[in-house]
Image (cartoon, rainbow, N blue to C red):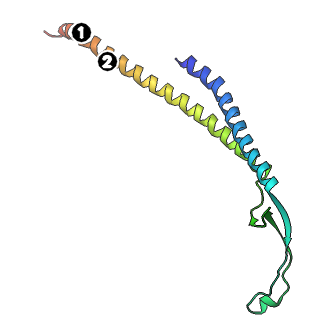
Amino acid sequence: MRRILMVVLVLGLPAAAVSAGLTAYEASMHTVRTQTAERHQVTARLTSTAKGGDWAKRPAPAVRVWVTHDGRVTDAPTSTLNAATSGWMVGSMAAFGVAAGSYAAWAGIRLALDRRRYAQWDAEWGRVEPRWSARFRP
């Protein structure tokens, strides 16, 4: 049984990690491509005087902001670094899951087999003990 679990671990861990990581990366890259197509960067300028104290009298600098096609201000599009990080994280979690699952299966099977062996030993001792202990009685 240990060999079967080792084969599952050796073959399943890389397969699960790579497939899950690539799937997460491709999904994140789809989001990156969609957001990049929908958003663009523009320079924002102050169009009216702000009310307030002395700080309002200073000229406001122009800033770069991301907007959608309809002019709504939004966040910057997700970067390819975020997509790569997502792929690595999901792949790592899949690898950990396969390793943990293999260990849990091994521990569960070992526990079940140990209980069965203890029950067999107990039954055998029940048959042998009366004859053996009788040899020591006067």
What kind of residue is marked 1? Answer: Arg
Position of 132 compared to 31: left or right?
Answer: left
Q: Please tell me how crowded label 2 is: few (under 14), some (14-19), or many (20+) other residues with Cα within 10 Å.
A: few
Q: Quadrant of the C terminus?
A: top left
Asked where in the image residue 39 lies, by quadrant, the reply is bottom right
What kind of residue is marked 2? Answer: Ala
At mark 2, the secondary structure is helix
Asked where in the image residue 53 lies, by quadrant, the reply is bottom right
Above or below — where is 41 with respect to 44? above
Position of 48 compared to 20: left or right?
Answer: right
Labels 1 and 2 touching (C-beta < 8 A) = no
Q: Earlier in the sequence, mark 1 or mark 2?
A: 2
Asked where in the image residue 111 lies, by quadrant, the reply is top left
At mark 1, the secondary structure is helix
Residue matched to label 1: 127
Residue matched to label 2: 119
Residue at the far bottom in the pictured view:
53
